[in-house]
Amino acid sequence: MDSPASPASAPAAAVALRGVSKRFGQLQAVDRVELDLFAGEIHALLGENGAGKTTLMCLLDGLYRPDEGRIEVGGQEVRFKSPRAAMKASIGMVHQHFMLVPTLTVAENVVLGAERIPLLLSPRRLRERVQAAAERLGLKVDAAARVGDLSVGEQQRVELLRVLDRGARVLVLDEPTAVLSPAEVDALFEALRRLACEGVAIVLVSHKFDEVRRVARRLTVMRRGAVVARFDDPAKLTDEALAEAMVGRQVSLRLERSAIQRGAPVLEAEGLVVLSDRGLPAVSGASLVVHAGEILGIAGVAGNGQGELFDALAGLRRPRAGRIALGGEDVTSAGPRERTGLGLRYVPADRTSTGTAPGLTVQENLLLRAYRSPPCRKGPWLHLDAARASCLAAIERLQIATTGLGQPARMLSGGNLQKLVVARELDGGVRVLLAMLPTRGLDVWATAEVRRRLLQARGAGAAVLLWSEDLDEVLALADRVAVMRAGRIVEVLEHERADVATVGRLMIGGSNAA
């Protein structure tokens, strides 16, 4: 299965990692990794959540220091004490969670912390300089725009621009498409191909098979911190072959979808008007009904009010107008705790600040809901043995990679943090499930497992409202598809009538005419 580590005709590696290892306490995050990166090449780094991909790249970026092994740049060993030191060696990394200041402009973010910007450069000249750099690199951004007003895809381009403007010739992107729309992914890949043609060495950290096949010339697969396979032509590999290399066993990616047993309406919203954080209408008169035993999927381009709609349904955002009912009971003015008591669970889009408490342990995060009721609660006391058993079972079900229940949640990888949120919200007593981007950042096995759990919740009689930016996921799981545009539900289609062409046309403002 393994192929040669580098092309026969390739020159010396721009960057080489030789026997690199990193340990955090009892966790061997990176284990004696060998990796060569070549100029003008897109190299994919594939692995399941917690495989060590991000940690390995943080060693290259200077965020961590290796315990063993060495890093070579241009054939010379280097020891980076910080990302700034790595940047001086022309190595830059765009992290999974953006490091931008929302209140500053694009131009200000690009030069923030840079060393070679004249002190007396006027704001106008600064914008012109950054705009010219963006156009030269083929990155479509407005240098004068405030970053907080940009879409996620535009912020991604700002991060790229900031790294490239500082002279990066080795570019690392950690799960860069996790929150991008399909059109934004296409634009990103076009930019990466152009940069590779200009001689930049690019590492694409991913777990998405289609992306690896689309852009990578070579592929390295990691599992449990070690390199387990290398391939020279990823485009020829099947999903099954990649999945087996990634998890070390055969993986079934098929979904068994049972016939729908639709019950009574459980979640109802009528004429909702919800404001954004900027005080502007984000949801404008939206109405929907979700029945017991069904999945209602929301399809729509990101930024059309989906986040505000889900926050309002969860009780995190008060509607300006309209009504919300749960099991026939008006909960429009009820808070999150009251809705939780009625069986509502919420997987939010932001797993870091809304979905988890990063400073608490894995166990404490898993118990944020369960501690109030049996078996975790016994009278006024927490039943410690039952709570521990419940948490261990949740970890096992979704294979959350953790060093133990006492590990701080902030130390989990992004994908494992997402698994933690999903495991907690699907752990018993679910009457209504609000699932926003539930498989975002998950590897192929975890994605399949979360989808199965959603179908299991549906089969157990839960009413599931799902929003995913992956239209194929919505179409695969939903019994009905509600298309959301400009803050409104413009049409609801039964599963049989919902296809990519029809839903896509409605998403961008077309009609449902044949």
Image: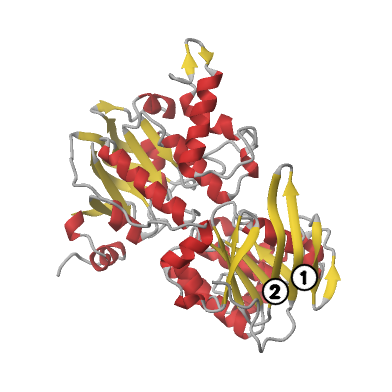
Q: Secondary structure at mark 2?
A: strand
- Looking at numbered disc 1 in the image, what kind of residue is underneath it? Leu
Q: Determine which residue is flagged by label 2.
A: 36
- Residue at the left extreme? 514
**Image vertical order of residue 446 relative to residue 160, above or below:** above
Residue 352 appears anywhere in the view: yes
Which amino acid, mark 2? Asp
User: Could you tell me which residue is drawn at 44 percent across and 46 percent down?
Assistant: 276
**The quarter of the displayed image where residue 157 is located:** bottom right
- The residue at which mark 1 appears reads as 121
For the residue carrying disc 2, how many other residues have a C-alpha within 10 Å: few (<14), some (14-19), or many (20+)? some
| Mark 1 crowd level (few <14, some 14–19, many ≥20, 10 Å Cα) | few
In the image, is 413 to the left or to the right of 349? right
Residue at image position (30%, 62%) is 507
Q: Are marks 1 and 2 in contact (CB under 8 Å)?
A: no
Expressed as whole percent of the image width and height from the top left, the position of residue 503 reads 26, 62
- The answer to whether 500 appears left or right of 434 in the picture is left
Quadrant assignment for the C terminus: bottom left
